[in-house]
Amino acid sequence: MILIATDEAGYGPKLGPLVVSASAWKLPLGEASPGDLPEAFAAVAKPVTVSGRRIVVNDSKAVFQPQSVTKKSGGYGKLECVTLAGARWCGLADARLDLVDDLAAHDRDSIGATPWLARLLEQAIDTESANPLVTAWQSGPAQLAGMKTRVITAAAFNRSCRGGANKSDLLSQTTLELVKSLLDELAIAPDQQVPDQQVPDEQVTVYCDRHGGRRYYAGPLQAVFDGTLVRVIAESKDESYYAVPYRGGEFTIRFTVKGDSFTPVAFSSMVAKYVREKAMESFNAYFAELAPQPLRPTAGYPVDADRFLKDIEAIVREQNIDLATLVRSR
């Protein structure tokens, strides 16, 4: 069985990128109901002590506290440890994780073209410290097979909105494109020459946290998956559930309220939050270096974003920064 889990970080802020992450898992299960899955992820969900820190895979909002960003014993270090362990486990990185090239290569050009995010391209992080976490996770049946992340800059965000999409549309499209990319890589072995219509050998299921207040996803699913006719299984206040044709068969996908309580979705949540926080480090460092006096950093959320934008008014003028590349329109 292949299970793909997705989540985002930075949906609400006015400054900084929207980050979406997806993780792909292989499980030795045939037809499995949701009730069978928590046990399969028990080893990943179990707390592990790494260098004196208690690491647990959980919703990133529960793990990370912004005030602890510089304290390696706090949430930031935990997010980093989980991300590094995942990259090492699935073979994405060995000794070092190149944050952009390994996790978010699709957005390398747009990141590099954004001065306040360009430092992300220099981020190469040693993964060896995460080995104890990998060892603990490998003891269970669920095996991480892949990770992918998208970093949507303010400029890209605003272009999408100018094209008629709202931010929920952008989140859904980005999420589903990540899902499709992982499915295309993993559903059929890459060294096999297989007709496009061959049904995958394994059951495939996808779990997502709900995208804001959105309840209906058939349209975005059809748009990303080549106009196929999506079958609606349920669309309730708690969960939207679909079957989507794919390579002659179909996979199921769920968008669930508080879906990040499910371990693989929580894992993707932590990866997305880590990349988002590294992006905000780059963002704040860029403007701090240009400021004539100490500049209080921002997490980018609306009220504090307005304060920060007022603080950097002179920098924006001096550097001739187009606000459409800096501030999200919605």
Image: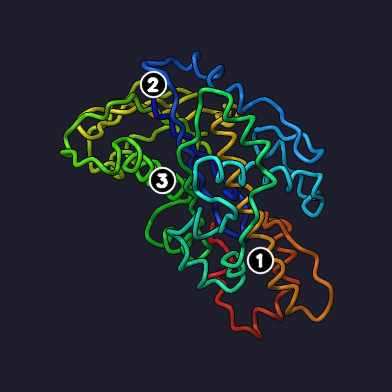
Compared to 152, does 223 lie above or below?
Answer: above
- The amino acid at mark 3 is Leu
Q: Residue at label 1?
A: 283
Q: Which is nearer the N-term, disc 1 or disc 2?
A: 2
Compared to 246, does 69 lie above or below?
Answer: below
Q: Residue furthest bottom?
A: 318
CB atoms of marks 1 and 2 within 8 Å = no
Front in this rendered view, residue 222 or 4: 4
Give the residue at x 50% y 55%: 102
Number of marks in the rendered image: 3
- The amino acid at mark 1 is Phe
Q: CA distance from mark 1 to mark 2?
A: 41 Å
Q: Answer left or right for 30 relative to 113.
A: left
Q: Which is nearer the N-term, disc 3 or disc 2?
A: 3
Q: Residue at label 2?
A: 234
Q: CA distance from mark 3 to mark 1?
A: 25 Å
Q: Quadrant of the N terminus?
A: top left
Q: Which is nearer the N-term, disc 3 or disc 1?
A: 3
Residue 5 appears at what percent x and percent y?
Answer: 48, 34
Quarter of the view holding residue 264: top right
Category of crowding for the residue at label 3, using alpha-carbon neighbours closer than 10 angstroms: few (below 14), some (14–19), many (at least 20) = many
Category of crowding for the residue at label 2, using alpha-carbon neighbours closer than 10 angstroms: few (below 14), some (14–19), many (at least 20) = some
- For the residues carrying marks 3 and 2, which lies nearer the camera in this image? 3
- The amino acid at mark 2 is Ala
Q: Residue at label 3?
A: 178
Category of crowding for the residue at label 1, using alpha-carbon neighbours closer than 10 angstroms: few (below 14), some (14–19), many (at least 20) = many
